[in-house]
Amino acid sequence: MTALLTIIVLVFILIAIWQMVKIFDLAQAKNENTTAGVATDKDNTLNGYLMMGFLAFIYIITIVSFVKWGDLPLMSNSASEHGPTIDNLMVISMVIIFIVQTITQFLLHYFAYKYKGEKGKKALFFADNNKLEAIWTIIPVIVLAGLIIYGLSTWINIMGVDESDDPLVVELYAQQFNWKARYAGADNTLGKANVRLIDIDRANILGLDESDPNAQDDVITTELHLPVGRPVLFKMRSQDVLHSAYMPHFRAQMNCVPGMITQFGFTPTVTTADMRQTPQMVEKVLNINNIRVENSKKLIAKGEDALERYEFDYLLLCNKICGKSHYNMQMKIVVETQEEYDAWIAEQKEFKNSLVN
Amino acid sequence: MSAHADNHAHDDDHGHHHKETFVTKYIFSQDHKMIAKQYLVTGTIMGVIGVLMSMMFRLQIAWPEEPNVLFEALLGKWAPDGVMDADIYLALVTIHGTIMVFFVLTAGLSGTFSNLLIPLQIGARDMASGFLNMVSYWLFFVSCIIMVSSLFVEAGPAAAGWTIYPPLSALPMAQGGSGMGMTLWLVSMAIFIASSLLGSLNYVVTVINLRTKGMSMTRLPLTIWAFFVTAIIGIISFPVLLSAALLLIMDRSFGTSFFLSDIFIQGEVLHYQGGSPVLFEHLFWFLGHPEVYIVILPAMGLVSEIMASNSRKPIFGYRAMIASILAIAFLSTIVWGHHMFVSGMNPFLGSVFTFTTLLIAIPSAVKAFNWITTLWKGNLQMNPAMLFSIGFVSTFITGGLTGIILGDSALDINVHDTYFVVAHFHLVMGISALYGMFAGIYHWFPKMFGRMLNKNLGYIHFWITAVCAYGVFFPMHFIGMAGLPRRYYTNSNFPLFDDLANVNVVITIFALVGGVVQIVYLYNFFVSIFFGKKATQNPWKSTTLEWTTPVEHIHGNWPGEIPHVFRWAYDYSKPGHDVDFVPQNIPLKEGEEELQH
């Protein structure tokens, strides 16, 4: 039935196009004696104006996008020490892009309008100008040199891990389709581990080396808690396929690769509680909850449960396609004061006590 | 050129030397013009499949997990009660990417126009090897059949993303699509690469050896330069993907460990030891990045040619255009690591790749400015091909500019694999290359089929497509900057992204309109082949040699001798001539200076 309907609709569309063509042909038959299918002066004029209209459309969609979606908290509310440097570089790049985009699109579409063809007009034979070409080679060179230098210094600062800061070492462990965190315990050294040592029966789910003294006090959790202001060094592992540990609020991302350990370090600067209080976040959460209330109404009408109220939390998302439930591979991140963190970690079971004999 | 083709044309002005059967003329043809048309039609069919897929997953993204009759009709068991399954969502994304990048924008674009234009524009009777050319097309056809047949596999087609990173793509237990579906994907791609290599070798040899008298390299139209350099990049980089595919097949089927190590999945430890998925990423992107230039360079060539012809002006900075093609081609082979900034490779390598990547902006900027200057003080003939060319420059700039964010390793950390990337590459290589292809089709349709496309349908096609392309991909940057990852079946598990749902609805509506309006084009294309208005020999008043051949196709292209070339391809509106174009085969007037820039 559906197939039949689809075919009927298609046939109607085709007939409509055919009729449209006939109307065009009739409308043009009188004044068109040139080669069929080639643009006439009338076409040139019309399309020239449309080019200006299209330029306006590009500008409008740019402005609307920036006004409506340009100030998402994720772009300006970074919660890590290096976050503002990335945001700063992002803003500079965006400003450059915005300027170049506005000017070049204007020239392109304005020329298309201004120099639209007319019968008998002759174009300017203008094939080359070394000075002009030198100018628009050198300007990008200078701008890009600046961006490259700024970008690389930012990159090196972020990726260089300073061990002398005594970072908190945490392992992020990925598997289809969830995350685990492993804290190094009092010795701040992660015990050795390999997926070959996984023993589900003994609840050694991350494959820690039970004979390694460093592993004894490791703590495995399903939530990531971080003390504010202390550098964290993440060591990433995956047991099955590629995953990517993406923590957008902290401007942090690194792939988790089976067979090797990758790393990424940052210092969280805003606690979850403080982030919830920022005006931007309050507004965002309010907006999201309004949307959720609307959606709930529809769900209730269908006899389903309403959506829960949303409260902001930092998140770790999987950002590398990893299989069927990739879209729901997440872990909550809680940034808290040192005291809160200490209390929380003290409640967790150490590895040596978590094994089943 | 083969002696056969030469004799042939001399013997017989009508081009019917020996009896051609239906099979040798339309199916196993060795004539480059027929092969070009075969590529175009096959590419179009694949394109329809690819676009349909994108419309289905856009519906799912905008209205997640809502039943849809379209899903029920097209996806069958993958959409129980009309609700799309998460596995098939990933499969649709994967196959859409594969089909559009390789089958439409590589084979459909390069295959069509390299085959059509190289012999015609350099003044050759045919490709250096007509037989290899035919084999190339039929290998492509076979790879299409295998790719499409993979859609009907019991456990589903390949679904690991078009980049098929192992271990996901290597382990059938990791994902349904990594079983038979992935095997067929790999076999199809291996055959595709063989086809592409045969084609590329043919193009390179033809351009080097078969240029007519007077056709020096610096008199070549920019189309030929673009096809020539594209073919060289293809020859350099495609074999690396072939080796990656072969090694992956070994890992999958013969127990080797090139890309796999230390894997525990579904309760058991696998035997793999010592391989690295990062190695696969290097091999894949060593092709994967040049691939985007394999896609975009031919489009650039077509657009340069069409812009000059329709502006009635020489292309501005001909030599700078060639230099920038060469610079882009060179740089394209040393930037692949920018896809891997957060893959776990050494951050120092990331710095190197940031540097080389941002350098590409320089030749790209030169090209964009040269196109804009070509329009300046022209006498612009707004044919549909010209509109698509202007559209190309517009989307190329919009999409290209965000490349300076993604190419910057520090910034890539936060937008890597989000919708920002999707927006960027769709504008800069997807839409742009598609525009280049449409421009080429509108411009050379009379050469291919001897009839004209309906220009008014062309205008409708362009303007609606142009608005929709921006409507789809411009807002997409912003949901990416908000941190929304790509390849999520639904975002409803993240209340954090609830405020982006309405943006996704807007995007999908534009995508649906943009997709449906392609029916206008398809109608125009297929109806005009048979019922279009008859074309004249040189409808656009162009200077290049293909317009000196008769409208009716003949074997060997020119009935008499091959024309000799006396000037470059861009003598439009040259002072001292009555008409505003001087074809390449017209000798210089007495005292006329040959201007070459």
Image (spheres, rainbow, N blue to C red):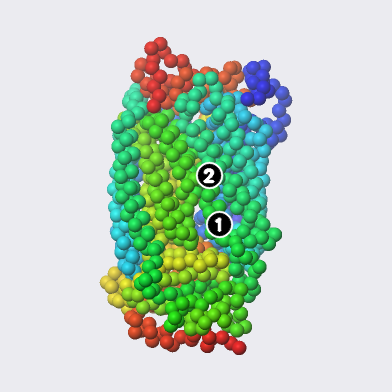
Task: Tell me the SS state at disc 2.
Answer: helix
Mark 2 vs mark 1, CA separation in Å: 26 Å
**What's the mark number on residue B107?**
none
Q: Looking at the image, which is closer to me, B195 or B143?
A: B195
Q: Residue at x 46, y 25 (%)?
A: B219
Mark 1 lies on residue: B279
Residue farthest to the left, as pictured: A279
Expressed as whole percent of the image width and height from the top left, the position of residue A312 reads 36, 75
10 Å neighbourhood of mark 1: few (<14), some, or many (≥20)?
Answer: some
In this view, A47 is above or below A317: above
Can you say which quadrant of the picture contains the C terminus of chain A?
bottom right
Q: Amino acid at mark 2?
A: Leu
Can you say which quadrant of the picture contains the N terminus of chain A?
bottom right
First-in-chain label (2 vs 1): 2
Q: Quadrant of residue B367?
A: top left
Does residue B497 appear to the left or right of A270 in the view shown?
A: right
In this view, B174 is above or below B121: below
Residue B471 appears in the picture as rendered: no
Instruction: Check the residue under mark 2 and report the chain it is in.
Output: B
In this view, B470 is above or below A323: above
Expressed as whole percent of the image width and height from the top left, the position of residue B316 reads 37, 31
Instruction: Check the residue under mark 1 and report the chain it is in.
Output: B
Q: Amino acid at mark 1?
A: Leu
Mark 2 lies on residue: B105
Q: Looking at the image, which is closer to me, B333 or B386?
A: B333
Expressed as whole percent of the image width and height from the top left, the position of residue B263 reads 60, 69
Residue A142 appears in the picture as rendered: yes
Q: Residue at x 43, y 83 (%)?
A: A186
